[in-house]
Amino acid sequence: MKHDNPAVGVLVNPASGRDVRRLVAKASVFQNTEKCNMVYRLLGALGVLGIGEVFMMPDVAGVACHIMHSLQYGRHGNPQKLPEVHFLEMPIEDGPVDTLRAIELMVNRGVGAIVVMGGDGTHRLVAKKCGDVPLVTLSTGTNNAFPEIREATVAGLAAGLVASGLVTAADVCQRSKVLRVDKNGAAEDIALVDVCVTSAGWIGSKALWHPESLRELFVAFAEADAVGLSSIAGLVRPVDRRSCYGLHLTLGPPGEGIMTVTAPIAPGLLAPVGITGMKEIKRGEIQTVAAAYGTIALDGEREIEFGGQDDIKVWLDVNGPLIVDISKTMEQAVRNHVFVKTEYDEHRRESAS
């Protein structure tokens, strides 16, 4: 059923694709100029499908300013009608809290879909606040095991199709798994791809690139062609995104344990990692972290410190955020004849008028 006055949220993380791994692992820098270009292509696709409003997060890095200026002076190079773009009224702290606030405001405004442009860390933050609003995931980060690398035009079409009701969300979306981390009996945080226990005593620089510090790895899914910590599992025993289980690996020095795998733990950084144990984890099955102290990395970034008095538990939840399958959405749009107008359709409209 087509929705009246459909709106879409677009979340662009201006800091994604710009962390310390550009120095230590020679990862590429994802320029904010290209992110802006992607937004213009998104807006053009949304306009074609009749999306009237788009809500975006403001920032101090120049993304919002660039988009506002181009829309005002017509420099986006798109002659098609574009949605009206609203930048959310919210304080800007130039940090993760901006993403959390923006998503909460988008949900409150009733958007039918949210397009997320960032890496694994950005999508993890979005997943904490998006509820049941479908997400269209676009990769603009460093380790991008979770979001897709897709052309923004097609991603915009998929978001517009779902938000407008031209394609039914239930037919083209799937629930993502999440790993939940509890500290001392209280919910602490989530990860969409992996939770890694390290021996580092403090968070410091959040990104991980020292394989000798890795102690345990929990994965919700693991793909053989991934880059990041989940690749350690993906090159040994891949786990599908749709399967109802994950994996728990215990790690050690290369040459010890049951095997050693050489994995791309960051872009351009292949490192040998020893695996001393491996087992499946079922949904809801509580896993206790064995290490006495260290830090917990969520989707590749250290977020939680713990010591000898802390009790850390990890469990797999299969009811995570709702993710739009872009390919399936476009295929359903073809079956629904969304993009095709026949002479019969034109004749019927003329007769009705």
Image: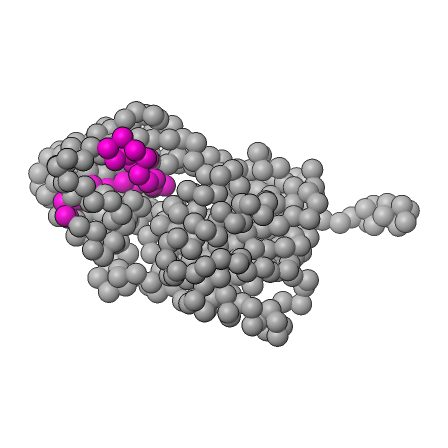
- Visible in this render: residue 164? yes
Q: Position of residue 10 (x, y in %)?
A: 52, 54
27 vs 260, left or right, is right
How many numbered circles are shown?
Answer: 0
- Visible in this render: residue 136? no
320 vs 111, left or right, is left
Magenta region's main secondary structure?
Answer: strand
236 vs 242, left or right, is left
Q: Position of residue 29 (x, y in %)?
A: 35, 65
163 vs 16, left or right, is right
Which residue range is magenta in the image?
180-201
Query: Is residue 196 rendered magenta in the image?
Result: yes
Q: Quadrant of the N terminus?
A: top right
Pick the front one: 286 or 329? 286
Query: Is residue 22 rendered magenta in the image?
Result: no
Q: Position of residue 132 (x, y in %)?
A: 51, 37
Task: Give the residue at x 55% y 45%.
Answer: 108
Task: Give the residue at x 18% y 41%.
Answer: 306
Task: Give the residue at x 25% y 35%.
Answer: 183
Pick the front one: 92 or 32? 92
Q: Position of residue 173 (x, y in %)?
A: 52, 37
* Colour pattern: one colour
Task: Give the residue at x 37% y 36%.
Answer: 178
Q: Residue furthest front?
A: 91
